[in-house]
Image (spheres, grey):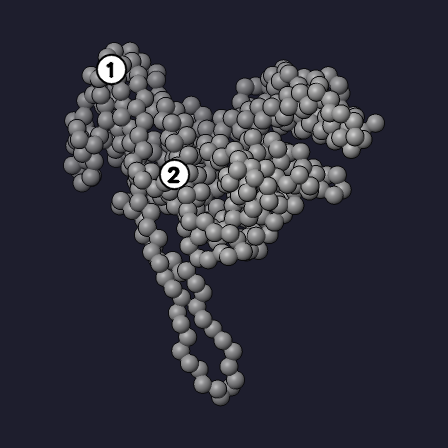
Amino acid sequence: MSQHSAIEPQSAAAFETGAGLENKAGAGPGGPGEAKAALAELATAFEAFKETNDARLAALEGRRPGDVLTEEKLARIDAALDTARTRLDRLSLDRARPPLAGPEPRRDPLGAEHKAAFDLYVRAGESAGLKRLEEKALSAGSGPDGGYLVPPTIEREVLRRLGLLSPIRAIASVRTISGGQYKRAVATGAPQAGWVAETAPRPQTDGPALSELNVPAMELYAMPAATQTLLDDAVVDIDAWLADEVETAFAEQESVAFVTGNGVSRPKGFLSADLVANAAWMPGKIGFVGTGAAGAFPAQNPADVLFDLVYALRAGYRQNAGFVMNRRLQSAIRKFKDLDGNYLWQPPLAADRAAMLLGFPVTEAEAMPDAAAGSLSLAFGDFRRGYLVVDRTGLRVLRDPYSAKPYVLFYTTKRVGGGVQDHEAIKLMKFA
């Protein structure tokens, strides 16, 4: 009997059909009990996955023909694992959101005045209060041309939620700027040094080569709609409503741009950087490691290329490094074992933690491409040092009650940029 046979058959069957993902009795929605139950379901699903996959591998090693039912069962449990992980992420996000009611924060007179004026503008289109505030504060916000700046509390809430929803933003460095672009000098090589005797001459050494890092802030927009009846309702929290409406739209667009963006009217993703084989790495390019098989992992010892990718990164970067891939590639890697028969992929240990692969956290980014001939489907590195996200201060809203009557449109814009800031901190796997 397998070492995982302690799993109750009904538990594995439940995860085959997804029935195990239902809320447990007595666990409040979004509360600690439900998060704990979701984490337990994920762990149980992975045990069922290991048991079924071990049976599949035993049949292959015994040169018995593959069992179609076992393959289908494994696929169902694998899908249930992804569903359980998605549910756990959603519960973690809901728990991170502030409560709708609670103690009032310390009042800021100007902030309270701005919030009240913005609330009146959103509900009734009255902009006189915002105009007076912008004149008082010498704000750069323009009324009918570019919209009005939202209160800082809403802007902070939107950025906080984006950090939870956008996978690359969550692991990258984030800078806030007041201009249109972020500029910084970066060294492309180390300064020269050498050993000398006590009385030997000391010739001048070459200094480090410098280049300019320039990350422009591009415009990202969303246009949520609401009926005037909803806006007239005094119990509706306008701040929370606007943040809810734009967070998903902004996060989806950012996630794609930070990975594959070409830098034209959008940030430049790390997959669009200049690439070179890691054996011939040079400053200004991201190194890649090949799998040795077109569009797939090697047939023999497929996990070996994962170790090649990990150790292609310098030790100083590996301390805070992690993997980035989409869920389909993660599903394939989930089956890999080491020489002792231990699975390389492990489920998260807590609701707000990531799954682990070879001891490094896994970030699931759906913008990463599927494995195909020549694809760059797996990234590994210290993204905090390797990728930079730039947010320009100011989230603007322009109210439009005319274009889609009876709905009121809110043209909401923010400016964000992104680019690789340290090419040595990120390595890619090329399926070729």
- For residue 322, above or below residue 119: below
Would residue 401 appear left or right of 308 to someone viewing this image? left
Residue identifier under label 2 = 261
Residue 292: horizontal and vertical position, in percent?
A: 60, 44
Q: Residue at x 52, y 78 (%)?
A: 195
Displayed quadrant of residue 126: top left
Q: Residue at x 25, y 11 (%)?
A: 406
The N terminus lies in quadrant: top right
Residue toward you, 285 or 186:
285
Residue identifier under label 1 = 404
- For residue 17, above or below residue 63: above
Q: Nearer the viewer, mark 1 or mark 2?
A: 2
Residue 244: horizontal and vertical position, in percent?
A: 39, 24
Q: Residue at x 22, y 21 (%)?
A: 400
- Which residue sits furthest right? 1
Residue toward you, 292 or 211:
292
Q: Residue at x 41, y 60 (%)?
A: 188
> Is residue 393 among the parts visible in the rendering?
yes
